[in-house]
Image (tube, helix red, strand yellow):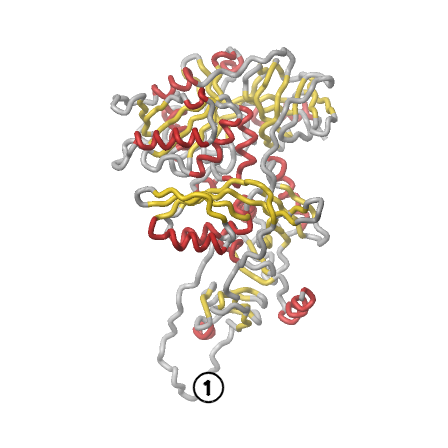
Amino acid sequence: MLDAAQRVSLRPEKVTGIFVDAPAISLHIPRPLHADHITDIEMDHIRNIAIIAHVDHGKTTLVDQLLKQAGTFRANEAKASEIRIMDSMDLEREKGITIRAKNAAFRWHDYHVNIVDTPGHADFGGEVERIMKMIDGVLLVVDAHDGPQAQTKFVLKKALENGAKPIVVINKIDRENARPHKVLDFVFDLFMELNATDEQLDFPVIYASARDGYAMREIHDKSETMEPLFEAIIKHIPPPAKSDVSYFQMLISNLDYSDYLGRIAYGRIISGRVKVGDSVVRINKDGRRERAAVTALFGHVGLQKVELKNASEGDIVGLCGFESAYIGETITDTEERVPLPFVDIDPPTISMKICINDGPLAGREGKLLTARQVRERLIRETLTNVSIEVNDTDTAGHFDIKARGEMQIAILVEQMRREGFEVLVSRPEVIYRREDDGTLLEPYESLYVDVPNENLGDILQSLAWRKADIINMEHQTTTVTVQATIPTRGLIGFETDLVNATKGHGIMSHLFKEYGPHKGEIPTRNNGVLVAMEGGISTAYSLDTIQERGRLFIAPQEEIYEGMIIGENARPDDMPVNPCRAKKLTNMRSQGDGKGISLAPPLKMTLERSLEYIAPDEYVEVTPKSLRLRKKVLEANARKRASQKVM
């Protein structure tokens, strides 16, 4: 086994100075970079900022333009920057959301600006809260027509609580229906609602079109570049605050992992200096101290990680040397130091089971099937994702996953299937608590829903059915913004209902509020399911009869096994059916000869929709190529005995 120092000397990125193992950017063309200009910058010339925006308000495009116009890309790399290079994960590009907080940096004149991209979805709040400790200011990007949305509120609230200085960027002013002055009023109201300080309320405003690459201080100015935004960042975002102490302190705000270097702790240096080879101490949350040598330091040039020899107060760096490190811990120079304060992230509120695939079709499409492989992958996720917890259960091959929302776990499962895993996933369940007197408590969320006027009645009925309490309703020109307090259980499946009821025009966001009294039973699914009573290949002849009973999830000539869910029953109870029955052939002509079979297209659900749809006694079977719904107990008689035991 090589020690840490030997691994550093042998790693392949040593040749070019580029950290190749990090998953951040795969599109950027490698080139030799030098980090000297990072380490020789004075603290007054450093700016640390985060970008905040609702989905599709132009956050990623704006970052691309800043990097491009600052000269980060060479001429032959300019095209790469036009494909949302900050969204480095395939899932981020497909879903149009930011999942992981990422770092980038650019040099403008004599200033070094570090940029942190923040997720906007509340399920990824663990990503947001920890990176807010690294920045001094934020760019709030809002659409010139839509204005700030509920999703923007979540991240901005965290930024203002941490004392960040805001710059408001009203983007997409080239839209025909842009209304920048009205949107500015909305932004001011939002700041007032979030209890911004007088200094934060005196925010500068920049009008921009990130797509076309220009920004302006006033709406009627003329500009062809992002120069006014660069100047606003340097002028209005303060440099890192000087510390009262001179010794080295750093708060761990993000994590990464490298096969060459092990755990990489990211954070901003609060005070002092550090260099490769220094002996430093990690202070655990329980007060224990661990000493280790710094084996590597990383900073950013553009979108690439580059090696640093040393770093000083105000820099955002990655530090290697500790076998284990966790969010919120302090790294300092000696054991006698007091740890830095850290704000805990929102607690997990959703629990799901991820199990090995024990179905009859297991192993046909995936290569990673065993409990050991699944467990190692889940544990590896916790190394870099602080808001996910993984626990073993009493049943071998079954793992309990806790997170902020079902979408966060769905993203993890989607990543696993693309890596070749086959797993079973259960329905999301909320995490309950009990008070000392035995009172059952459940998590509540603050829900914000923006719906068209004509769909308001349907949405209010759905919210009432889900035990939500309406707090406020604001009527706009064509839409209504509904604010409600709802049990987390009631949110499961609500987004799908909202999309269906509003034909895709509804927008929702939610924030964890508190634990409160249990609200009683919330109905989940009104209809039962059609369950296959034997295995085989589905036939059009059989499905033609079955489709009269409900909606089909499968097509002809698909492989079926006993206990697999092939459709939704029109009635509340489950119905066993045989989708593999073939027509008996005889030498007699029958009345049906010459008549074609007409089957309705099967309903194909996404992973998120499948997880919301299934009942507590069902699984979603996830493989690299297929999504199947099935009963937990496949054999009909065993299923009946299990249900009788529960009763």
18 or 242, nearer to the observer:
242
In the rendered view of the protein, which quadrant contains the N terminus? top right
257 vs 223, left or right, is: right
Q: What amino acid type is highlighted by mark number 1?
A: Thr
Is residue 589 shown above or below 189?
below
- As helix, strand or loop, the secondary structure at mark 1 comes to loop
Which residue is label 1 attached to? Answer: 586
Evaluate whether residue 32 shows in this view: no
Residue 338, horizontal then vertical, whole percent: 69, 19
444 vs 460, left or right, is: right
Residue 314, quarter of picture: top right
Residue 133, horizontal then vertical, whole percent: 56, 25
Evaluate whether residue 168 shows in this view: yes
Is residue 431 shown above or below 278?
below
Dot 1 alpha-carbon crowd within 10 angstroms: few under 14, some 14 to 19, many 20 or more:
few
Name the residue located 45 percent from the left edge and 55 percent from the top edge: 462
Name the residue located 51 percent from the left edge and 30 percent from the top edge: 158
145 vs 270, left or right, is: left
Residue 487, horizontal then vertical, whole percent: 55, 48
Residue 465, horizontal then vertical, whole percent: 49, 56
359 or 586, nearer to the observer:
359
Name the residue located 43 percent from the left edge and 12 percent from the top edge: 110
Q: Which residue is farthest bottom? A: 588
